Image (cartoon, helix red, strand yellow):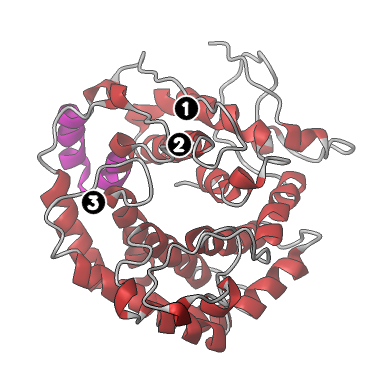
Amino acid sequence: MRYSIFIVSLFVFSCTENTTTKDEELIPIQDAQIEITQPKLNLASAELLLTLPLKCTEQEYPNKLSQTLAGDKDLLSPTTLHPAFYGCFDWHSSVHGHWSLVKLLKEFPEMEMADSALHILMMNITPENISAELDYFSRRTEGSFERTYGWAWLLKLAEELHTWDHPNAKTIEQNLQPLTDVIVAKYLEYLPKLQYPIRVGTHSNTAFGLSFAYDYALNTKDEALESIIEKRAKDFYKNDKGCPLTWEPSGYDFLSPCLEEVDLMRKILSEKEFMNWVDTFLPELKQQSFTMETGIVGDRTDGHLVHLDGVNYSRAWCLFGLLNQYPEFAHLKALANTHFNYSYPNLIGDDYEGGHWLASFAIMAMYTE
């Protein structure tokens, strides 16, 4: 099979010396008749991606606080309200911007700007700053703040720190731990009360929130969180049938409601249970001819329309996770790459509306297991 793929602009800037192997190449040569592998970063492209969270994690404005005002006293600057996670336009994007710093440092500690990335982590995730974040989360008016999207990314950051062997990683993890504990407690309190899952393609999608939290629970051996997520995932989704994939994406989606559910259930269910479940929920995934159109972005300067780049990355990581776990879905590899390759050439130099958050989504797609 032949695939027409755009050459990614990230490599245009880094091709003075080709030090990558065939397996390390991010995008295959245009029209090459080869097996497409999951996109991976090399050092040059990692350094370019690093510029995005380096910029936004320290950029306070523009900023969307999404707070509930109880009075004039609450009208404070982002750095006052959120001294750890004040940048990247909004709180959750700042959190996963910090995750991007950790992930890239783990994969490429030799990056030229590695010291700057580590400095930001050490300066922002301090006991004093996390204490101020805790004060915000303890406000009576903010019980649902960042539920569950920001919660999920906070636990993804905590998980990445927990599995990082850098000498400073344990200190940063310990500094973050009080907030991590609060988020875990919020999950444990909230999930038994949630009567129905939220099946949208944006922040409050329940399957996404459970999936990242489940990864954290497994990697940190948090049995209570693991248990409640397994129970609620089965309560919410085990009897689902015929997910309307043709309804996707909606105009502002950055998540696929159907594929996020698949991504969660492949982690929760045994192989036999999952294969039976997917036969009922989304049987077309097993068809060799299965395809779906990428999310098409009409205007990358529009903060909502650029969400469709996000849906391409998140679809890719859901598909990669599935095919990496079960060889029966290997035929989905080209589809995952098609989604990734549609959006990736636009990432560097993109408008801040997308540039403040999309690097994290691209990195997730490249390192999904």
* Residue under the image location 40 percent in, 78 percent down: 71
* Residue under the image location 54 percent in, 42 percent down: 303
**Which segment is the magenta one?**
261-281
Q: Disc 2 designates what residue?
A: 311
First in sequence: mark 3 vs mark 2: 3
Q: Position of residue 267 (x, y in %)?
A: 29, 49
Is residue 283 or residue 146 the one in the foreground? 146
State which mark lies toward you, 1 or 3.
1
Q: Is residue 271 magenta?
A: yes
Q: Position of residue 75 (x, y in %)?
A: 50, 75
For marks 1 and 3, give the CA distance.
Answer: 28 Å
Is residue 326 or residue 286 the one in the foreground? 286
Q: Disc 3 designates what residue?
A: 268
Q: Is residue 130 magenta?
A: no
Classify mark 3: residues with Cα within 10 Å, few (<14), some (14-19) or many (20+).
Answer: some
Q: Toward which corner of the image does residue 72 lie, by quadrant?
A: bottom left
Q: Position of residue 177 (x, y in %)?
A: 44, 81
Please tell me whether residue 173 is drawn above or below residue 303 in the rendered image: below
Q: Which mark is residue 14?
A: none
Three-letter code for the amino acid on which mark 2 is drawn: Val
For marks 3 and 2, give the CA distance.
Answer: 23 Å
Q: Secondary structure at mark 2?
A: helix
First in sequence: mark 1 vs mark 3: 3
Residue 116 appears in the figure = yes
Q: Disc 1 designates what residue?
A: 295
Q: Toward which corner of the image does residue 17 lie, by quadrant?
A: top right
